[in-house]
Image (cartoon, helix red, strand yellow):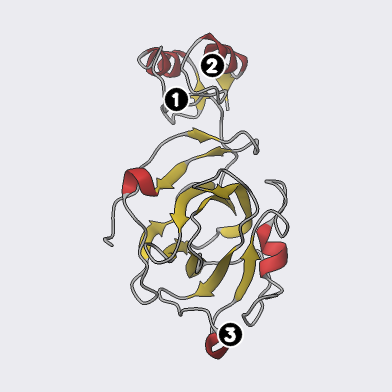
Amino acid sequence: MSRTLLAVAVAFTTQSALLADVVYDETVSGDLSGNAVAPTSLGTIEDAVLLVKGSVRTPIDTRDYFTLTIPKGVTLDSMRLIDYYDGSTGGFGNTSYVMIDDGPTSVIPANSTSGDFLGGSHLNRVRFPNATTNMLDRLSGAPQGGSGFSYPLGPGTYTFNVQQTGSQENVYEIQFEFGGFAEPCTGDLNGDGSVNGGDLGVFLGSWGESPCDLDLNGDGVCNGGDLGVLLGAWGPC
């Protein structure tokens, strides 16, 4: 399993009102590391929302380890389970595991290492019913291993692990939301702080594309619906 560059895209999730600024998708960016001492680095956080999409199952791909670094002035305020299902059946009954550790490396969660990371929990739709549930509420209490922690989590490097020790495949999407950044400006596609003709030109360059990175309303296509969103946000951010 190799380290890879981030695939940067605008993404919309049907269960969350936030747009993901950055997406790491294993099907695009490569498999996340299964090695606790050599996690995949997602780099230093520069945007308010990060979406990580992956899958785990034994014996093919038991664990996904990845790190992120929170810079000065920024905090990790929430984690949300956007999507979670059995990759073979499409069902929602499987249980896997998720954990947080501090530092650039971690451990394999077990009874012998239960005090060596911050917090872990079973991962399913019972523990985290929907995308409005902040996963940090449960993880901070370390219900299935860990020393416990307070949140929001401040500056530093953190390692995350999602694992499935059973043979079923669990597909997950976890959204990380960070405080300390300016509020995102819907429609400001060129980053100049205003929604104007420059953004309109950028958007029209993607007209009709599907899938479309500049999809503003989440329907998978750049079309008149997105144009309406852009025009509704017209003016300074």
- Which is nearer the N-term, disc 2 or disc 3? 3
Which residue sits at x=54%, y=22%?
A: 219
Q: How far apart are marks 2 and 1 (CA)?
A: 8 Å
Q: Distance between the residues labelled 3 and 1?
A: 43 Å
Q: Residues within 10 Å of mark 3 (few under 14, many from 20)?
A: some
Above or below for 217 versus 64: above
- Which is nearer the N-term, disc 3 or disc 1? 3
The mark closer to the camera, 2 or 3, is 3
Callout 2–callout 1 Cβ contact below 8 Å: yes
Which residue sits at x=36%, y=72%?
A: 35
Q: Is residue 45 in view? A: no
Give, as a three-letter code, the residue at label 3.
Answer: Ser
Badge 3 marks a residue whose secondary structure is: loop
Image check: 114 left or right of 135?
left
- Which is nearer the N-term, disc 2 or disc 1? 1
Above or below for 219 versus 140: above
Which residue sits at x=72%, y=51%?
A: 129
- In this view, the residue farthest toward the top is 224
Instruction: Please give the residue where the numbered disc 2 appears in the rendered image.
Output: 226
Q: Position of residue 26 (x, y in %)?
A: 38, 49
Instruction: Please give the residue where the numbered disc 3 appears in the rendered image.
Output: 114
Q: How far apart are marks 2 and 3 (CA)?
A: 48 Å
Q: Where is residue 45 in the image (x, y as percent from the top left)?
A: 45, 55
Badge 1 marks a residue whose secondary structure is: loop
Instruction: Please give the residue where the numbered disc 1 appears in the rendered image.
Output: 214
Give, as a three-letter code, the residue at label 1.
Answer: Leu
Q: Is the C terminus in the top left, top right, bottom left or bottom right quadrant?
A: top right
Nearer to us in this view, 43 or 65:
65
The mark closer to the camera, 3 or 1, is 3
